[in-house]
Amino acid sequence: MSLEDASLDIVPGELLAVVGENGAGKSSLMNVLYGLYHPDAGTFLMDGKPVRLKSPRDAIARGIGMVHQHFMLVPTLTVAENVVLGREPTRRGLLDLDRACDEVAATAKRFGFQLDPRARVDTLTVGSQQKVEIVKALHRGAQVLILDEPTAVLTPQESDELAQVMRGLVQQGRTVVLISHKLKEVLGVADRVAVMRRGRTVAEVRASETTVSALASLMVGEGSRGAALTGVPVTSGADTALTGAVAPDAGTVSTGPIVLDAKDLRAKGDNGRPALQGVSLTVHAGEIVGIAGVDGNGQRELAEVLTGLRVLEGGAGTLLGGPLAGLTPAKAKARGVGHVPEDRLARAVVKAMTVEENVALGRHRQPPFARGPWVDFKGRRERTNQLLATYDVRPPDPTVALQALSGGNQQKVVVARELDADPKLLVVVQPTRGLDIGAVAQVHARLREAKARGAGVVMVSLDLEEVLALSDRVYVLYEGRVTGHFPRKDLDERELGRRMLGAEPDHG
Amino acid sequence: MGERTRQVLPSVLSVLLALAVCWLTIALTRDADTATRAYLQMLWGGVGNWPAFLEGGNANAVLRPLGEAAMKAALLTLTGLSVAVAFKVGLFNIGAQGQMIWGALAAALVGAHVSLPAVLHVPLALLAAAAAGAVWSSIAGVLKLKRGVHEVISTIMLNWVAVSLVDNWLVIGPLRAVAEGHQSSITGTAEILSTAQLPRLLGDSSRLNLGFPLALVAALAVWVWLARTRSGYETRAVGLTPEAARAAGIPTLWRAGGAMALAGALAGLAGAVLVLGTEGRYPGTLGAPYGFDGIAIALIGNNHPLGAAVSAAVFGILRAGGTRMQLLGVHKSFPELIQGFALLFVAGRMVWLALLDRRRSRQAAVEVPRA
């Protein structure tokens, strides 16, 4: 349900930008255009004629090319080999590499790219690899080029260069669709901007007639957020937890003991580039601290540092009475850190194991899950049954493989396990992503419960609404730095949105 | 269909299909009657000719074949366990052969050059063999965990290093036994002392020795360890989802390294059972590739310790009986062919399950609710 009644017109020879928050449906819409997803309803017209794209192959045949955020290149092959992959020129049944190189060089020259067709892709910079992707699409005759978050991986200089490339393509009569959430950039290059929110296209404006803050307001949506929760009556039981959240504990400032005090944290991301560039934060017992930000601004790495999964490169801090430096997952657990990670299947559970084995994971060395070196089957079963009932996991069967449960029930198992350990600091990342509304309400209620029991909760969420609903304080992260810190009484959606996009504090 | 049936059925069907295919091969090259009689000979050769025995035949007609089958089953069980244990932690141990070679050599040396009463001598020789195998597999384990060297490559190469060092140098060079008395020359290491021999269990008529119960105990112990202990649970978690295991505070490197060392120890024990049970010394060359057979045994046993023991028993019987096929002019390598086919078919586990699921859904259209 990531797309709901989204409409988009693409005019030949223009540079259209599609902007929206994470989960607004930008990528889903583009995947529909590229034939990866099939719409449940609605029509798709090309040159006025209805078209059904069965696969990316169809899309390519009709002149639609896509450059994914994560490149689809074979690193050990050369530029030319990558570009012609799938439609290699042959001579007597063998790959004609010379012709491939000539053809690719010609295409690159025609669109003004400087690329050595014989260079191996893994020797190129990220910016050049992206150019290879673009050349690949153009080489296959793309008239419409979709770029998904193309600047997310680029340096500012590379981004400027890409902007020129895109303008150049448009001048040559190609159409470029740019998906982004970097508003400043978008306004610099696009002719027209379409804004998406919650699976709908809510506005289409000319870039020359709008501003960054106007777009930001459109993206986060002004006025009642409750109304944006499409299709669910506000009075339904599942929703009370969501809407009821905003009022009652508003303004609470915890004065509980400090459970986390971190200064100037620095860490590298998976790609080896700095992901945290000096983050300082404090968390008290008995409060929920929201970490807001657009995806990929260091939130994930922050959560990993706090749970001992990522090495701290700089900075220091105290976490539950011990140093933050040199933290390992085992040490973090021993000090009382609970963790509900973002990627449940990779990090939180062993999906091929049974529900009860997963409930034991992490606490499997202590009662009631173990007795000496042995697994305590009886104790484990009892505790699991108890938790499954309390958390309303369906089916309440401790012996089924975890992978047989739905995503929402899997998440309930994870939350149940982490809260059952009575953590002093709970680090949750995207705790409700992909869950249905009932499960969302339950997870939210449990987080509040943890807070009421005196746990400090750090909640990373890309869903601004979730952050607003639950947090007592909010830190905003942008490019690995804290760009905003708001106590609950000062929470302002628009201001948060602006800070998430890297805007300076508004003094006006 | 229960989960357990789903685990077992593909292996059983694969072995049956392999038997059928090989029967067909013999039937096509010879004739159906020969094929059937060859299979019968194989069976008598493996489990003993019970009809003849019950009609008042010699007990040896039963004891001898059973002993041969059990001896082969013991070796296959241990090497199968070796591969299966490594699999549990997500590593593919192709090196059981090399680990077995070192185990055999260690057992032969302790057996020949240490003087102890049998109650201590046998355990010490077994321990030495296990340690030697563990050290050899740990080389691959450390390379994998510290340097990221793929264990398939390193264990294969270590196999050849073991063959070169032991077979091609040590046992024909420095460790070669000195000929005594009337012997003009001997190959391999010195004969082990009688105190180091694995006791025969059925007297002299059968080569069944302590190695077979030992292998069964090993299988049972590995199963209990994996299923019922904390560290076994951790080991399985590391094998299934290493990142989740790490996040749960499990020492993933130690668990993976430990499982690899245990795999080597089990293969080493196989070497010891071969030397202390039947060979009596490290022969000129170890020959029989039980270490490689272990891969097939583990896979056919679905990487379950008890499954490996069962599949080792089945193929021990077929192997022991295979020689009897020659009486009918059928080549004795057919049991190996059956094993190969079974491995091939079991690799298509998913195909089997898809077929079984389709059958089930046709029988009863009641699907387990996925809540």
Image (cartoon, rainbow, N blue to C red):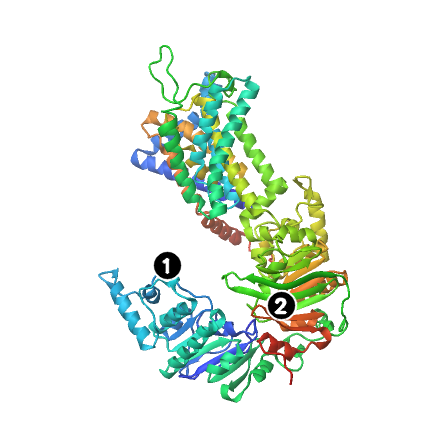
Q: Are marks 1 and 2 in contact (CB under 8 Å)?
A: no
Helix, strand or loop status at disc 2: loop
C-alpha separation, residue under disc 1 versus residue under disc 2: 36 Å
Q: Chain of mark 1?
A: A
Pick the quarter of the image with the N terminus of chain A: bottom right
Work out whether residue A259 or residue A336 is closer to the camera in this orientation and state it: A259
Can residue B310 be seen at all in this image of the molecule? no
Work out whether residue B3 or residue B146 is closer to the camera in this orientation and state it: B146
Q: Quadrant of residue B155?
A: top left
- Residue behind mark 1: A76
- From the top left corner, tell me how far across and down residue B265 is, in percent: 51, 34
Q: Residue at 57%, 68% (x, y): give it.
A: A480
- Residue A461: mark: 2
- Residue A429: mark: none
Residue B146 placement, left or right of A303:
left
Mark 1 belongs to which amino acid?
Answer: Thr
**Dot in front, 1 or 2:** 1
- From the top left corner, tell me how far across and down residue B138 is, in percent: 49, 39
Question: Of the residues under marks 1 and 2, which one precedes in the sequence?
Answer: 1
Pick the quarter of the image with the C terminus of chain A: bottom right
